Image (cartoon, helix red, strand yellow):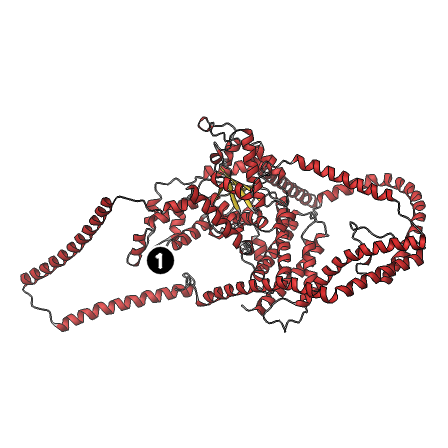
């Protein structure tokens, strides 16, 4: 796709965003009382923003113009933040983390949308991530902790044993060849004996040829019949085309073009950065003196006009207030004179207003007392009505949209075919910067000139006492800051981050994340979610619902600093579910997609490390200091229920699993919006923990279920193909998906890997895979029964959000019953 096509895509997306912003501003001003209508409105906005997000992310990834990319990045981050805000609104409205948009998607004629992960999260930090991985692997290899290398490390064996192994293998090979040769001789002898016994002569060549023709024609006809049957199935849509899963030449070519485009992006970025410096220096040399003289003349004129109008010279603004820029920003000298006259008139009007206000206040007090009763009734009605909470990202989107309209919408770029930087835009920006820098110098000169004028004309002398007071105030403030600084002690102020990083790696607290993408967490959407909720049945979330929440609460805020600062803050996340559903994989996926460091503070991992209160304090200080310095970071607590045990088992008392119980809430309070640190807990037995402290630590609780039929079907097919298997008609995947009801993703993956050995993959050409091969391997495994799934559901119903959801459902059902009752009474009265 060329630059023209991506520019066109950008313009279309901006148009869609503009219309959506107008639509949202209209609807948000209207308060709504019906929750169903409110949810549909929020859901439609959410879906449309996700569409814009997908297009904008593609444009930002592939467009090569550096100045356009700056604006697109600003809008992209704002759209991300708005999606998170809308998600938060839907959660507060429905009191659940999982939402279903089946009916809305049908109305909009859209397929289920997946929130994309921006590629720039890793792409723009690729060098930093690679360098950090090298340092980590180097430290691990020095300590002998590099498990990845130790798996494949060859063990040294004595020479005699090696010779014996080679001899055994060689003799076995010779034996197999000898056996094959003897078999051939034996078959020849058997044929010769049969001919002698039957006494038949050599067959006629004509009869032999006829026999060969029969067999060959039968084989050809059989092949044609199978081909016709396959073509019919493809035509009916019951089977994919033969080359459906193959990668086409067009896709390969597009990947090459993408790589070339990335190289062009880097070149243009470098040219743009160099141009920022060179153009500024040119402007300084060419226009610096002119700007300085213009500013001085402007300020002198202001002095004279103020003296003529008011009779005194004006007070010059301080540096803290902004200097002369406060007066002359976007104003001509004539406008400044008008402002001076307006200020004089306002002072006179204020005096008159004060008298009127005193009279009016007396009258208003009487009216307020009368209206109190009526206001109470209005407040009750307003409480029932829903209102959208204020957004921090709408302004950013509007600013980005307006700058797009002003600069890029009607800009002629026929001269800029390679889409390199625009020097005129840089000149405009650098002129402003240069003017602000020169203005600081001019302000110092003009302050002195104003003093001289006052001395010469008015014979005014500034009192030295004022300056002294200001200095004293400044000293007092500094003293306060110093006291605050002493409270937050840095236990490792004399050490470098590299040394702390190395210590944490050696202690096993900072570990290497497994490279797993979130797209590898395979599943399918729940298409019956809305239907089940309409019948008052709370559906179990699907695997893709879980994946969406991981993207929204984990990956997007960690990947973008601006989104993390302004979006609804999520400091901690809990993944609860039975073993094998992919909780650990999701933690590693968050680190892979954002390039985050992974710290392991599991009870089993910190047992015996940094003993005592001081040791624990030092450990947490080290972890969170390094996490802040090298953010984004993920602090993982595996089997986190152990930290909040109701009663510690006797076997685990030595390990002190509850060491972090008191300290975790404190650490969460210290985390600020600037700190891109996420605490992620995983648990298989959440019911063993004390509920209240458990829910205080973890803001968001995500229930990870066992896969449903649709997810199992997709999982079986995808994992078999990834491991080298061939899906043929003899392999009934639907049967496998039905039989493995209750089995987790981990169990299914393990079975596939056990069956698809190298030898079995080679045999597929003449011996296709069958379902029985996989089923026999699963007989020794225990599935997740419905009772266990219900126990997770019941536990989740006791969490704060789960309770709110249950209350909202019970209240909603009671209201429906009342409405039905009222309707029946009305009908009876009519009769």
Toward the viewer: 297 or 720? 297
Residue 308 image position (x, y, % from top left): 93, 59
Toward the viewer: 308 or 638? 308
Which residue is found at the position 47% from the left and 36% from the top?
605
Which residue in the protein does label 1 denote? 728
**Dot 1 lies on which element?**
loop
Give the vertical position of 212 relative to 386 (above or below): below
Image position of 673 (left or right of 635): right
Toward the viewer: 521 or 480? 480
- Report the quarter where the C terminus lies: top right
Give the vertical position of 470 relative to 228 (above or below): above
Residue 510 image position (x, y, % from top left): 50, 42
Residue 422 image position (x, y, % from top left): 65, 67
Toward the viewer: 422 or 345? 422
Which residue is found at the position 70% from the left and 37% from the top?
482
Residue 789 image position (x, y, % from top left): 48, 39
* Residue 700 in sight in this render: no
**Residue 428 appears in which quarter of the rendering?**
bottom right
**Residue 236 appears in which quarter of the rendering?**
bottom left
């Amino acid at each position: 796709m060329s630059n023209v096509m991506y520019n066109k895509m950008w313009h279309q997306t901006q148009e869609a965003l503009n219309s959506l912003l107008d639509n949202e501003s209209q609807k948000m001003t209207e308060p709504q009382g019906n929750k169903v209508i409110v949810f549909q409105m929020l859901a439609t906005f959410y879906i449309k923003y996700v569409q814009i997000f997908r297009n904008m992310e593609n444009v930002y990834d592939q467009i090569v113009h550096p100045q356009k990319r700056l604006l697109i990045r600003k809008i992209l981050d704002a759209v991300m933040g708005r999606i998170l805000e809308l998600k938060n609104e839907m959660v507060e409205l429905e009191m659940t983390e999982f939402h279903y948009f089946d009916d809305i998607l049908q109305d909009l004629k859209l397929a289920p949308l997946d929130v994309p992960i921006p590629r720039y999260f890793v792409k723009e930090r690729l060098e930093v991530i690679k360098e950090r991985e090298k340092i980590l692997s180097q430290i691990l290899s020095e300590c002998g902790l590099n498990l990845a290398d130790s798996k494949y490390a060859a063990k040294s064996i004595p020479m005699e044993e090696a010779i014996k192994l080679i001899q055994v293998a060689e003799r076995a090979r010779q034996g197999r060849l000898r056996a094959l040769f003897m078999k051939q001789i034996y078959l020849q002898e058997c044929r010769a004996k049969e001919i002698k016994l039957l006494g038949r002569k050599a067959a006629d060549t004509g009869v032999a040829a006829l026999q060969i023709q029969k067999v060959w024609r039968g084989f050809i006809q059989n092949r044609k019949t199978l081909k016709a049957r396959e073509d019919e199935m493809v035509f009916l849509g019951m089977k994919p085309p033969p080359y459906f899963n193959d990668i086409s030449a067009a896709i390969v070519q597009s990947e090459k073009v993408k790589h070339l485009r990335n190289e062009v992006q880097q070149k243009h970025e470098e040219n743009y950065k160099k141009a920022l410096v060179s153009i500024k220096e040119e402007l300084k040399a060419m226009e610096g003196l002119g700007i300085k003289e213009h500013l001085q003349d402007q300020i002198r004129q202001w002095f004279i006009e103020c003296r003529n109008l008011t009779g005194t010279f004006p007070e010059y603004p301080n540096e803290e207030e902004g200097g002369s820029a406060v007066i002359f920003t976007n104003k001509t000298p004539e406008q400044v004179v008008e402002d001076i006259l307006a200020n004089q008139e306002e002072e006179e009007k204020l005096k008159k207003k004060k008298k009127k206000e005193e009279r009016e206040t007396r009258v208003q007090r009487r009216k307020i007392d009368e209206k109190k009763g009526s206001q109470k009734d209005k407040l009750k009605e307003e409480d029932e009505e829903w209102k959208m909470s204020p957004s921090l990202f709408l302004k950013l989107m509007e600013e980005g949209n307006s700058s797009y309209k002003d600069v890029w919408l009607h800009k002629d770029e026929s001269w800029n075919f390679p889409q390199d930087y625009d020097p005129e835009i840089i000149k405009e920006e650098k002129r402003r910067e240069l003017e602000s820098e020169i203005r600081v110098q001019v302000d110092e000169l003009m302050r002195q000139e104003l003093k001289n004028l006052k001395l010469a004309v008015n014979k005014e002398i500034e009192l030295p006492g004022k300056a002294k007071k200001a200095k004293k105030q400044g000293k007092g403030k500094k003293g306060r800051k110093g006291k605050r600084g002493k409270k937050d002690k840095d236990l490792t102020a004399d050490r470098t981050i590299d040394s702390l990083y190395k210590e944490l790696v050696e202690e096993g607290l900072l570990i290497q994340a497994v490279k797993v993408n979130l797209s590898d967490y395979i599943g399918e959407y729940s298409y019956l979610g809305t239907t089940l909720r309409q019948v008052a049945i709370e559906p179990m979330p699907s695997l893709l619902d879980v994946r969406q929440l991981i993207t929204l609460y984990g990956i997007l805020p960690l990947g973008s600093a601006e989104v993390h600062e302004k979006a609804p803050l999520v400091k901690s996340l809990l993944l609860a579910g039975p073993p094998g559903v992919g909780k650990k994989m999701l933690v590693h996926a968050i680190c892979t997609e954002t390039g985050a460091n992974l710290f392991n503070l599991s009870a089993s991992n910190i047992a015996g490390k940094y003993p005592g209160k001081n040791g624990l304090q030092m450990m947490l200080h080290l972890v969170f200091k390094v996490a802040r310095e090298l953010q984004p970071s993920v602090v993982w607590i595996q089997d986190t229920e152990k930290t909040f045990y109701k009663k510690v088992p006797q076997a685990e008392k030595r390990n002190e699993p509850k060491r972090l119980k008191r300290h975790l809430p404190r650490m969460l309070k210290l985390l600020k919006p600037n700190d891109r640190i996420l605490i992620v807990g995983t648990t298989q037995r959440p019911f063993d923990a004390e509920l209240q402290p458990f829910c205080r630590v973890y803001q968001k609780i995500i229930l990870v279920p066992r896969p449903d039929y649709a997810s199992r079907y997709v999982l079986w097919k995808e994992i078999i193909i990834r491991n080298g298997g061939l899906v043929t008609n003899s392999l009934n995947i639907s049967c496998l998906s039905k039989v493995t009801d209750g089995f987790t993703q981990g169990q299914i993956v393990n079975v596939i890997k056990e069956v698809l050995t190298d030898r079995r993959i080679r045999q597929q050409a003449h011996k296709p895979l069958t379902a029985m091969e996989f089923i026999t391997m699963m007989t020794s495994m225990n599935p997740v029964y419905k009772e266990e799934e219900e126990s997770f559901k019941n536990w989740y119903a006791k969490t704060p959000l789960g309770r709110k959801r249950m209350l909202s459902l019970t209240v909603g059902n009671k209201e429906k019953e009342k409405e039905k009752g009222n309707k029946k009474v009305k009908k009876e009265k009519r009769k």
